[in-house]
Amino acid sequence: ADALGRQPVFSLLRDRAGTLWVGTVGSGLLRWEGSKFVPFPLAGGEGENGVRSLLEDSQGSLWIGTLTDGLVRLRDGPFRSYSSLEGLPAQAANAVLEDRQGDVWIASSSALSRMPREGGPVRTFGEKDGLPPGILLCLHEDRPGRIWVGTQSGGLAIFEDGAFRRAPTGFPVFPILVIAEDAQGRVWIGTDGGGIATLEAGVWRIFTTEEGLASNSIH
């Protein structure tokens, strides 16, 4: 039987080899094997309670962000786990991003961590550094290299020139589920209940079902 069944899906990734990976709640990490999804158990049992985020980095490593067991990296067979012992602030890795320098950013329930590509200590950012309060849900690096951070409480922060700043006011206060960028370089913010928004000349332009969206929840 297919392991996916009716399990909620949090993340999807097609890697450079063409393999499709699925992060679920209930079945952990799944891999497509020609005709069905099969479980892909991690070495220490990480991710059994859920896989929240997936990333393939520029070196071909697969990063697996779990709900309760930190972060796992798969590279050419061996697994490596990262948790509070390695400096991560929490065991949930809600989003994982590799920036253009090759550093890996991890959004957790309470803070944002940056893992340097060349190794060294993990640096963690919190409210004292300018992040909004609340659970961090999504990350995006835009064309100029700024890191956008969206939260469950609707807060939005931008990391630029080594510091965080809050996004301009006027943004709808709904959980931010996804951040994406179009071909013109405009950043779009998808929310759970508030539709989608983009910043134009410093002012938020908001689109909801009143403007033709099928739903105000954008994943």
Image (cartoon, rainbow, N blue to C red):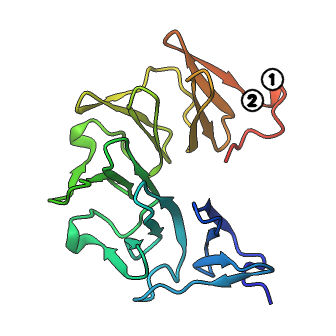
- Nearer the observer, 214 or 82: 82
Image vertical order of residue 131 relative to residue 90, above or below: above
Q: Looking at the picture, which amino acid does disc 1 mark?
A: Glu
What SS does tag 1 mark?
helix
Give the residue at x 62% y 80%: 26
Which x, y percent locates residue 49? 52, 80
Q: Amino acid at mark 2?
A: Thr
Q: Is residue 135 visible?
A: no
Across and down, in percent, residue 185 comes to 55, 23
User: Viewed as shown, does residue 51 lie left or right of 182?
Assistant: left
Relative to residue 132, is residue 118 drawn left or right?
left
154 w.r.t. 19: above or below: above
| Vertical position of residue 199 compared to residue 57: above or below | above
Q: Which mark is residue 90?
A: none
Q: Residues within 10 Å of mark 1 (few under 14, many from 20)?
A: few
Q: From the image, tell me which residue sits under label 1.
A: 211
Give me the residue at 84% from left, 28% from top. 212
Between 76 and 88, the one nearer to me in the picture: 76
As rendered, which of 36 and 159 lies closer to the eye?
Answer: 36
Query: Badge 2 is on which residue?
Result: 208
Q: Residue furthest left?
A: 120
One can see residue 122 in this view: yes
Callouts 1 and 2 close, C-beta under 8 Å: yes
Badge 2 element:
loop
